[in-house]
Amino acid sequence: MDDVKPVRPGWYNAFRPWTLHGAVVPVAIGGMAAYHDGSFCWWIFLMVLLCGCLLQSAANLLNTYGDFVKGTDTVENETRSPELVTGAIKPRSVFLAGMACLAVTALCGAVFVWYVGWGIILFGVAGIAGAGLYTVGVSYKYHGLGQIGVFALMGVLMPLGTYYVMTGGLSWEVFLISLPNAFLITAVLSGNETRDYHEDHKSGVRTLSSHFSYEGSMRVYLAQNVIAYPVLAVLLILGTVPWTASLALVALVDLRTVVRNSRLAPTNEGNSRLLVPLCFRHNWHFGVLLVAGCLIGYYAMAPAI
């Protein structure tokens, strides 16, 4: 993969469906744990998965809208999100689409309240606020809180919320299992902020990465990609996950590609643009392999352990 393909401005790019791993993997982690604990309902799980994807889509749409109205996205850097700066879509349409995703999520929340009780509202409010206020309203992205928000909301609270919907309770085990993937999801945003580092400085955007030098931002990006593996190793040693969860170590192949690309990114625009998609792939492969490895250990290998 030498470069990323140029995007066509339109609704497909505005929704960014290739980012949905950010919702699918955390929901799968929570669902896997609930299934192992004997509390699982397929149609509720699919509704939670739908809500996760809607929240991710809302965040994508409202981020495009927020960056445009604040002047962060311009004609000069239209490769970021060309939909609004090129006039392909009207800003109000993007805003309403994002709000519609949040509204459907809220309606699904009423079903979850009926199914498991009022406690789920806390997770729902956190998810909707996190997706809706990233660059709109309080715009916590512009206060350097984007990566912290992604780690907490998508990396940790989404698996815990999924588990809560299915079981009506919380689990330290789910929290711990969510941590490796939480770092990798955050690494995606770190790559985004590092890719846009110089443009953000010109626009006055104060992301977390902008508080470091470019080199420091790159080190944070790499650390978040790497740390998932020692965290997984600790979980394996402690027996928090079955030994078959080591299947996720196959994603070290992706990590190698991420590291190699990062060395070229500072001086090569094509490699800089790859900081994010390579992280997408790394996160997706690691997350799927982690869930698959746990399920294999819990069930397929159960007679042998």
Image (tube, rainbow, N blue to C red):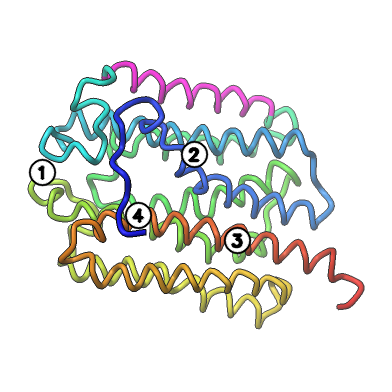
**Front disc: 1 or 3:** 1
Asked if the residue at tag 3 contacts the one at tag 2, i.e. Cβ–Cβ closer than 8 Å, the answer is no
Q: Which mark is residue 175?
A: 3
- Helix, strand or loop at mark 1: helix
Q: CA distance from mark 2 to mark 4?
A: 23 Å
Mark nearer the N terminus (2 vs 1): 2
User: What amino acid type should be assigned to the residue bearing mark 1?
Assistant: Ser
Q: Which residue is mark 4?
A: 276
Residue type, numbered disc 2: Gly
Give the amino acid type for the residue marked by disc 4 in the picture.
Answer: Val
Q: Quadrant of the N terminus?
A: bottom left
- Image position, residue 146 (x, y; %): 33, 50
Is tag 4's residue or tag 1's residue first in the polypeptide sequence? 1
Mostly what secondary structure, the magenta segment?
helix
How far apart marks 1 and 3 lie (CA) works out to 37 Å
Q: Is residue 133 left or right of residue 35?
A: left
Real-space CA distance between mark 4 and mark 3, rounded to the nearest whole angstrom: 25 Å
Residue marked by disc 1: 203
**Regarding mark 4 in the picture, which secondary structure is present there?**
helix
* Secondary structure category for the residue under label 3: helix
Locate residue 183 relative to residue 214 in the image: left or right: right
Residue at 55 percent of width and 38 percent of height = 52
Answer with left or right where residue 207 lies relative to residue 225.
left
- The magenta-colored residue range is 91-111
Farthest residue to the front: give it: 2
In this figure, which residue is indicated by the disc labeled 2?
Answer: 127
48 shown above or below 2: above
Crowding around mark 4 (Cα neighbors within 10 Å: few <14, some 14 to 19, many 20+) is: many
Three-letter amino acid code at disc 3?
Phe
